[in-house]
Image: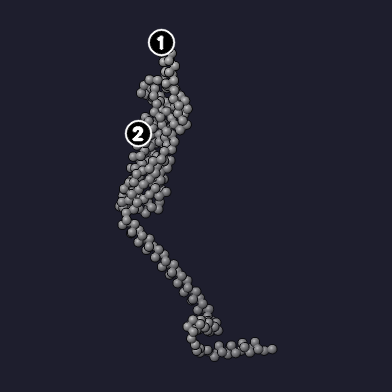
Amino acid sequence: MAVVIIVLVVLVALPLAGVRVLPEYKRGVVFRLGRYRDVRGPGAFWLIPGLEWQKVIDVRVDTVALEGQETVTKDSVTIGVNAVLWYRVLDPQSAIVKVSDYESAVYQVALTSLRTIIGAHALDEVLKEREGINTALRDVVDRATDAWGVRVDMVEIKDVEIPSGMQRAMAREAEAVREKRARLIKADAEAEASNRLNDAAQQMAGNPVALELRRMQMVAEVGAEHNSTTILMIPSDFADAARAAAQALNRP
């Protein structure tokens, strides 16, 4: 009787021992007697006890921070670069069968590709064209990991560390650029003012009365500023014109 009970327990427990349950974001790569069988999950499925076993893969997007790397740019400047990588497994079979450790492999490919891409660009390009470099880096890493069933969604350069000596040189260059821009703006303003004065002089040259009025206005401004007495020599034709204008206004 005891033997029968033991046999019944084994018959019931053995099938239950092969039951597996995986959440929505995981897959099970199943092997039977050492050979690849299929990919199962999510949900519940059954493995033949003793004959089949599984390797569980997370198919969600994974984020990896690439440690700071010292690399040399195209113009021979040594800089430190930090980056972040986002990737996910699209083919669980390839991620298990074709590479021993896909996570480490993706990380190493990203590091070497980062150094290669930075080495192909000058420092100014690394600082100003970061979006284009990110896209190029993503394409390179994605092509390398495609055979492993891994898709790289995005790569972002997070920080670029520049040597202190280069920072001072860049600051001096920026200051020189700003000074140049200020001088150009001042020169343009002076040129415009000179053109305006030239136009005004040409107009006054054809109208002596307007010229004398401008001269009197200027003298009045100078006298008001310096609190002084000014003696003017007024041309006779200007005086005659003023007298005639006054007489015309006084006529009934």
Left or right: 241 as drawn, with respect to 30:
right
Q: Residues within 10 Å of mark 1 (few under 14, many from 20)?
A: few
Q: Residue at x 36, y 60 (%)?
A: 171
Above or below for 200 versus 144: below
Q: Position of residue 172 (x, y in %)?
A: 35, 61
Q: Position of residue 88 (x, y in %)?
A: 42, 37
Q: Residue at x 42, y 42 (%)?
A: 154
Q: Nearer the viewer, mark 2 or mark 1?
A: 1
Q: Residue at x 39, y 22 (%)?
A: 52
Which SS class for mark 1?
A: helix
Tell me the CA gap for discs 2 and 1: 48 Å
Which label was assigned to residue 101? Answer: 2
Q: Position of residue 204 (x, y in %)?
A: 52, 80
Q: Residue furthest top?
A: 1
Quarter residue 55 falls in: top left
Q: Quadrant of the C terminus?
A: bottom right
Q: Is residue 205 visible?
A: no
Residue pointed to by mark 1: 2
The three-letter code of the residue at mark 2 reads Asp
Q: Is residue 149 visible?
A: yes
